[in-house]
Image (spheres, grey):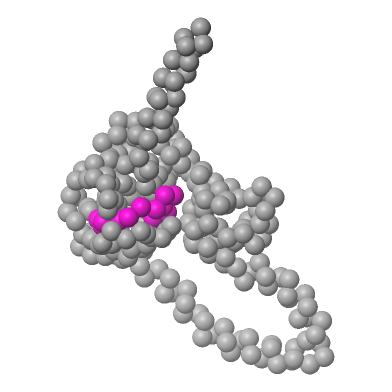
Amino acid sequence: MRRLIAYPLAALGLVTASLMIGSPASAHGYVSSPPSRQALCAAGRVGDCGPIQYEPQSVEGPKGQRNCHGGLAQFAVLNDNGRNWPATSVGTAVTFSWVLTARHSTSSWEYLIGGRRIAFFSDGGRQPSATVSHQVSLAGFSGRQTLLEIWNIGDTPMAFYNCIDLQIGGGGPAPSPTAAPSPTARPTASPTARPSTGPSSRPTVRPSGPAASPSSRPTGTVPGTEWAAGTTYRTGAEVTYQGLRYRCRQSHTSIVTWEPSYYTLALWLPV
């Protein structure tokens, strides 16, 4: 009887061991800014996405493909251009940011529009940082475009695929008009500043201290605000999560799986 029991247990142990050995360590990552289609699904901005909303970092397929879903049937929704994907308005030069939930030696990064490669970055097999950014010129393109970004792994035949929908053109010069009023602000500030330098300046300085701290953080959040998915956080923003306080290290739009924790130190730093 003992032998009859021992044989199934031994067989089960062999199967478990083979599963553990046979599952390779895989790299994971996706484009956070401008948000890729899988990032939009994970943030809930596009509904009914299926399993990709829970694992946006997992669109991994053989190298050489030119699609949004890496050839994975469970992520086929990413290849559906009829889903009215939100397009991010950009100028003719864009910084694309990846968040890598598992870093892996990297061969190269490719950026394509309409099957045409417009940018290529070689890493020569190096291990990347937890966040990777590339500035890419979109000169020669305008209107709505779908850009394919590919992360080619250095020591496997696999790559990661991300599609980003963009509205190109008209976004570049917008900040310049707001910068023009700054010279007029200085003359008006100087007369009022001089009378306040007397004895009356001391009472006014103290109230302005606490008030200045939230406004000094152009982050869109107030320190102590609870972290939430689908929120745009800028560098320096402070949030609370599970009773702890964190400061944003890199501007991004939050999604599920990017909660402040040990696994997202590239985005959030405990304070």
Residue 53 position (above or below residue 4): below
In the image, residue 142 sits, relative to residue 208, either above or below, namely above
Is residue 138 rendered to the left or right of residue 30? left
Query: Residue shown at 43%/27% (left/top)?
Result: 16
**Residue 32 visible:** no
Q: Write down the quadrant of residue 201 in the picture.
A: bottom right
* Relative to 189, 94 lies left or right: left
Which of the 4 image quadrants contains residue 105? bottom left
Query: What residue is drawn where x is 46% and y is 9%?
Result: 4
Q: Report the side of 29 relative to 267 (left or right).
A: left
**Quadrant of the drawing holding the C terminus:** bottom right
Residue at the limit of the structure toward the top, as seen here: 1
**Residue 74 or 93: which is nearer the viewer?**
74
Q: Is residue 130 above or below residue 178?
A: above
x%, y% of residue 80? 30, 36
Image-quadrant location for residue 127 = bottom left
Image label count:
0
Task: Decide whether the magenta segment is chiefly helix, strand or loop.
Answer: strand
From the viewer's side, name the closer residue of 126 and 18.
Answer: 18
Looking at the image, which residue sits at the far left? 116
Q: Position of residue 34 (x, y in %)?
A: 39, 55
Q: List x then y, in percent, for residue 205.
A: 76, 81
Residue displayed at 31% across by 42% down: 60
| Residue 251 in sight here | yes
Residue sitting nearer the eye, 206 or 42: 42
Region rendered in magenta: 97-110
Q: Where is residue 180 in the image (x, y as percent from the top left)?
A: 46, 79
Whether residue 186 is in magenta: the answer is no
Query: Which residue is at 26% across, 36% downward?
Result: 71
Q: Magenta stretch containing residue 100, yes or no?
A: yes
